[in-house]
Image: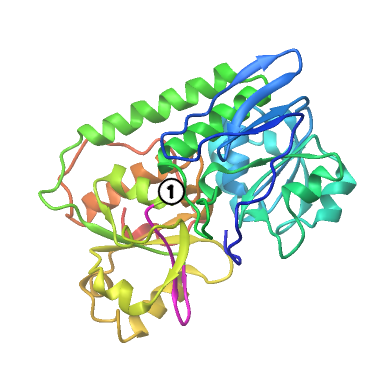
Amino acid sequence: MKSKLFPLLVPMLGASIVFAGCSNADTSKQAESKDGVTITNCGKEVTYTKADNLFVNDGNIISIALAAGAADNVKYVSSIQRDKELLHAKYGKDIDKAEDVAKEYPSLESIVAKHPDIFVAGWNYGFSEEKNLTPDALKDQGIDSYILSESCRQEGSEKRGLYDPWEAVKMDISNIGKITSHADTADSVVKDIDSRLETLKKAPQADKAPTAFVFDSGTDTVFTSGKFGAPQAIIEAAGGRNGAENVEDTWTTVSWENLAASKPDVFVFVDYPGQEFEEKIAALRSNPATKNLPAVKENRFINLPYAMWTSGPLNIDAAEQMRKGFEKFGLVPSSEIKPSLELPASVPGQNYYK
């Protein structure tokens, strides 16, 4: 997720590709034929002729494949360790059958060595022009690619974000289900997400939606998520508003002053190695721009794992957890919402909002 931003203008892979529109109104066109399965990915129609061996990178994208019923198709994974316990809690241990190829993001060479049918990743979720790991480079090796819809790039811009975040998640689940011949399973997951979203929508709402600021990490600047990232959808579903909703991008950096100006009622954290949860709180408590904010002084903190914040089916679980956190802090009325997922005890900071 966190690397230099790159343009989208790279060819997608498959037996046939034709350009399609890139507006938010795009839907995932799917068609089956004797020549393969055709879906729309990042505004382009792509046909996949084989999907028996998938190589999937990153916990959130792995969760998409698992939710879509494609566990047996996933033969290789990478960058799973930080989310493995969470994936076990949600989907069981079927994913352990896949070969763990790389602790972090894989290299082009490591993917080619396994020669999967499809490499499933995203821009800044594995794909990198800087590392020459692109759909083009894989195509040259006879390997197809599927790009995470949340990471699709805006035309003529380095910014990501073509789709509403929930539509992006559901599109990916449906696409992977279709590609791997598990369309019925994928459809049931999409319906479950819609049902749970409707339940959250019907819950009592605050007169003024509380502002939540996503604190991924902080150094000289703060890494957060704008209006096209999954957190935007998660926060809104929980009954809040994103403090960085004016940023037309997905994951991006803002200044500490920009953070403070949003006057957050609560901070939500992305839990993964690199900067520990307590280090992030310490940064908020020590920075002049944030140390006196009420949310900091009153310990209004919600910490959830990486795969729950980045685009994937666990986003709905994150929304339910956030809703209960908002209720605990008195920011929204009490409700009958009960999170479907029990977080692993190893996730730090649960004492702040439970």
Q: What is the secondary structure assignment of the residue under circle 1?
A: helix
Where residue 46 appears, as percent x and y from the top left, is 67, 31
Question: Which residue corresponds to the image point at 49% horizontal and 56% vertical from the top-left?
Answer: 347
Question: Which residue corresponds to the image point at 63% horizontal and 41% vertical from the top-left?
Answer: 62
Image: 41 above or below 351 = above
Answer few, some or many: residues within 10 Å of disc 1's Cα (few below 14, many 20 plus, some between 14 and 19).
Answer: many
**Quarter of the image with the N terminus in it:** bottom right
Nearer the observer, 188 or 346: 188
State the extent of the magenta-drawn residues as a range: 217-227
Where residue 13 appears, as percent x and y from the top left, is 73, 38
For residue 69, say whether it is visible.
no
Image: 229 above or below 75 = below
Nearer the observer, 351 or 6: 6
Image: 173 above or below 42 = above
Where residue 265 appears, as percent x and y from the top left, is 23, 63
**Label 1 belongs to which residue?**
230
Where residue 286 appears, as percent x and y from the top left, is 36, 85
Number of marks: 1
Question: Which residue corresponds to the image point at 52% horizontal and 54% vertical from the top-left?
Answer: 306
- Quadrant in the picture for residue 221: bottom left
Nearer the observer, 3 or 23: 23
Q: In this image, 113 relative to 327: left or right? A: right
Q: In this image, 118 relative to 174: left or right? A: right
Q: Amino acid at mark 1?
A: Ala
In the image, residue 102 lies in the stretch drawn in magenta: no
Nearer the observer, 93 or 178: 178
Question: Which residue corresponds to the image point at 58% horizontal and 42% vertical from the top-left?
Answer: 87
- Quadrant in the picture for residue 273: bottom right
For residue 152, say whether it is visible.
yes
Name of the residue lying farthest toward the top:
34
